[in-house]
Amino acid sequence: MSLPISLIEAIVGEQNFLRSPEELYCYSSDASKMRFIPEGVAFPADSAQISALVTLANERRFAIYPRGSGSGMVGGCLARGGVVVVTNRLNRIVEIDSDNMTAVVEPGVITGQFQKAVSKYGLFYPPDPASLAFSTMGGNVAMCSGGPRAVKYGVTRDYLLGLEMVLPTGEIIKTGTRTMKGVVGYDMTRLMTGSEGTLGIFTKILVRLIPEPQSIRTLSAIFFKLDLAVSAILGILKARIIPSTIELMDQATLCAVENHLATGLPVDAEAMVLIEVDGPDKVLDDEAARIYEICKKAGAARVETARTKEDRELLWRARRSISPALGRIRRGKLNEDVTVPRSKIPELIRSIRKLAEKHDLPIVCFGHAGDGNIHTNIMLDRKDEKERRRAAKAVEELFAIVLGLGGTISGEHGVGIAKSPFIEQEIGPGGLEAMRRIKRALDPLDIMNPGKMFVPDRTFLDGDFV
Ligand SMILES: Cc1cc2nc3c(=O)[nH]c(=O)nc-3n(C[C@H](O)[C@H](O)[C@H](O)COP(=O)(O)OP(=O)(O)OC[C@H]3O[C@@H](n4cnc5c(N)ncnc54)[C@H](O)[C@@H]3O)c2cc1C
């Protein structure tokens, strides 16, 4: 059925509804690099307009696809026809309540900008996806995003108190409470967090904040054996120090970065670990010294402690250079954010090395070792049909390995389209059917972000890319 264009324009205004092929093209992809062309792109101004659009979508049977900044890695905001609803006009920080340490934001607020705004009050919003300079709070809630700080501070869900949202049938509801406690009814906020735009569109987000940590100390350690690196990480946690970040780069990553930066990284080492602790100045020097000793005792060949801001930037340089460095190996990659219990990291990386050999593809592993979240980048040339097929097979085998180790196929990127063929393997047919029932109950006409999560789709593995 064709779109009721004049009715949509009457809701959002003619200037806020795009339909030309060039404009649609601009909203046809995300960081997954898959491409699907929508029929229209709407920029509503508030929840009333979103509600009216969604109500119209139910009456006239067209699909709605919520979209923030389009930085998602799994194609979650991509539209096959229908209307993309972009939230960037809902971009106000509505309130920062310093006394109660809470804040209300609209979904189009950029996460990093929100963090800067609360920092002026000495407050801290910890979730730190690496995309925080451009991803939106709405997208972060929809994907339950997390980042390096998750090991100490948790992820987006841990800071959410409540939501205002437009349900797939058009009603506007509120979930949660402003108080730290609240047990009235089902925990709808938790259900909606990570729902990937399939259960409605968030229009206001109520979060809790914590005091901003006073200082940070950063250390990096080089290990010639991966097992030693992981035993150092476990040792730090056993010493009951919870770093705010524990990042690991495997040997393939070190080689790629050294090839790119040529700063003398030890390419014969199996792992480099970057550790940060944050908190009051007076405890940090002691914690940093203890971490130094633990790494040394575990067998680190070299441990460096940053003394200045510049030192810290230098230690982070290798980690921050991974993306451009990988581009020199192959133009394409399948970036899988698999997560295993921390102690299983060596087993995971050893199995991945075997996969790389078996499928004759470079596989580069790095990531948030503190929470077992290892970004596994299967490098490929997508134009090479054989490589593409081998990479798809490697992904399937990787997921089987990760589930066998008691892990999850996605620690932070979500399911979207990319992981839709594998969701059942992790949660089982019963779990999947329960989720489908929730979806059907709230979205009987399958208006809201259809074709995601529950519908196996192999485009990410087999399809054409941008
Ligand atoms: C370089 C880079 C680094 C990244 N690093 C991380 C990382 O460290 N950790 C991490 O977790 N992710 C990371 N990501 C992935 C991505 O940035 C996150 O998933 C982010 O939360 C997406 O936000 P967005 O605004 O771009 O959402 P989009 O990509 O536009 O949408 C993502 C999903 O959210 C839904 N959605 C968007 N807004 C709303 C709303 N208001 N209501 C309901 N549903 C909505 C969409 O339908 C879609 O399903 C990274 C991506 C890139 C490109």
Image (tube, grey):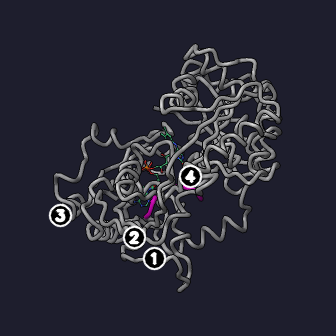
Question: Which contiguous range is marked in magenta?
Answer: 448-454
Q: Which marked residue is nearer to the observer: mark 3 or mark 2?
A: 2
Left or right of residue 63: residue 53: left
Q: In terms of sequence position, does the residue under pointer 3 or pointer 2 come before the other? A: 3
Residue at the (62%, 20%) spot, across then down? 256
The amino acid at mark 3 is: Ala
Residues at marks 1 and 3, CA–CA distance in whole angstroms: 29 Å
Q: Position of residue 151 (x, y in %)?
A: 64, 51
What secondary structure is found at the residue carrying circle 4? strand
Dot 4 or dot 2, earlier in sequence: 2
Q: Label 1: which residue?
A: 175
Q: Is residue 151 above or below residue 265?
A: below
Residue 449 colored magenta? Answer: yes
Please state the horizontal and vertical placement of residue 398, each as a whole percent of the image. 74, 40
Q: Main secondary structure of the magenta part?
A: loop
Q: Are marks 3 and 2 in contact (CB under 8 Å)?
A: no
Q: Secondary structure at mark 2?
A: strand
Badge 2 amino acid: Met
Which label sits on residue 289? none
Residue in the image at 77% along x and 41% along y: 345
| The residue at label 1 has a CB less than 8 Å from ligand 1 | no
Q: Which residue is mark 4?
A: 279
As measured in the structure, the alpha-carbon distance from the residue carrying label 1 to the one carrying label 2 is: 8 Å
Q: Are marks 1 and 2 in contact (CB under 8 Å)?
A: yes
The residue wearing badge 2 is 165
